Amino acid sequence: MTAPLRLLLLGGYLSYRALFEWLRPSLFISVMLVTPVLQMLFFAELGRYAGSADPSYFVIGNAIVGCTVACVYGPMLAMSEERATGTLPVLLASPASRICIFVGRLIPFAVNGLLVSAYTLFFGSLVTDAHIPADRIPPLGLTLLIAASACSGLGLCLGAIGLVSRDVPFLANLVALLMLLVSGANIGMDRLPVWLRVLGEALPLSRGIEAARRIARGDSLSAVGGLLLGEIVIGLVYLVASVGVFAWAEKTARTKATLELA
């Protein structure tokens, strides 16, 4: 078990660290810390002005959606940059477990997304009228972790697509905007057209957001267990899909002898 665990943890850490070869600290702070907070404050104040919902509704929803910055773009860049930096042939030639490779790349971004969501939630509770009881913090933390992990599974799937396509950044932007619209963060799922509601349920976060709101209102973890289980299943589906796309890209590259172009 030592080698798989080493690959899982060290491989994920090095992949995460490799992003800072070109990512400046100022960019990291503005994207990871400032943008989610400003987005949350915008919708919270807009909701207050319109009188549509309690501020906690928007604070919780946008805090969870804030993890998309790390969980969608991070894994996508970590995987797609394998081709750009010329390390893809080495990765494909390695006998290492593909599951360990993918899960290892998911872990640091899931933790990063959890921290972004927690920071945004904490800041929102300080500067708005949103009140979250202290005893609700542990179950909320678990919900944020599950939501961030599921979202990272989607990011990995986009990253695997990036091994065979150059248009993944555009796709990632589109997916992130869709999640902001159809996840229920700012517009209730019951107010969306049926096709948008189905799309929202097919993407991560919608169940996590609903579970977090119910926990903040006093529901127990067992009461929202179905929602959390659904969020876990969605994340696993995207993780399995990412492994499948990667296997297809690897087979295609080996067949055509085009590892650098895979």
Image: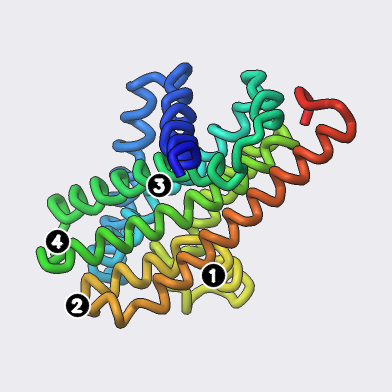
Location of residue 27 in the rendering, given as x and y in whole percent from the top left corner = 38, 25
Q: Earlier in the sequence, mark 1 or mark 3?
A: 3
Q: Which residue is mark 3?
A: 110
Of the residues under marks 2 and 1, which one precedes in the sequence? 1
Where disc 2 sits, the SS reads: loop
Q: CA distance from mark 1 to mark 3?
A: 20 Å
**CB under 8 Å between discs 3 and 2:** no
Which mark's residue is nearer the viewer, 3 or 2? Answer: 3
Residue 70 shows in the view = no
First-in-chain label (3 vs 2): 3
Q: Which quadrant of the view contains residue 214?
A: bottom left
Identify the residue at image location x=37%, y=66%. Answer: 209
Closer to the camera, 85 or 169? 85
Q: Counting residues from the N terminus, which is met first, the one under dot 1 or under dot 4?
A: 4
Q: Amino acid at mark 1?
A: Glu
> Could you tell me which residue is drawn at 58 percent across and 47 percent down?
99
Disc on res. 129: 4
Label 4 CA crowd tier, 10 Å (few <14, some 14–19, many 20+): some
Q: Nearer the viewer, residue 185 or 53?
A: 185
Q: Residues within 10 Å of mark 3 (few under 14, many from 20)?
A: many
Tag 4, which secondary structure?
loop
Q: Nearer the viewer, mark 1 or mark 3?
A: 3
Which one is in front, 109 or 194?
109
Determine whether 171 is above or below 129 in the image. above
* Disc 1: which residue: 201
Up/down of 75 relative to 198, above or below: above
Report the residue marked by disc 2: 218
Q: Position of residue 178 (x, y in %)?
A: 55, 55
Which is nearer the N-term, disc 2 or disc 4?
4
**Please, which residue is most extreme toward the front here?**
1
Q: Residue at x 42, y 37 (%)?
A: 9
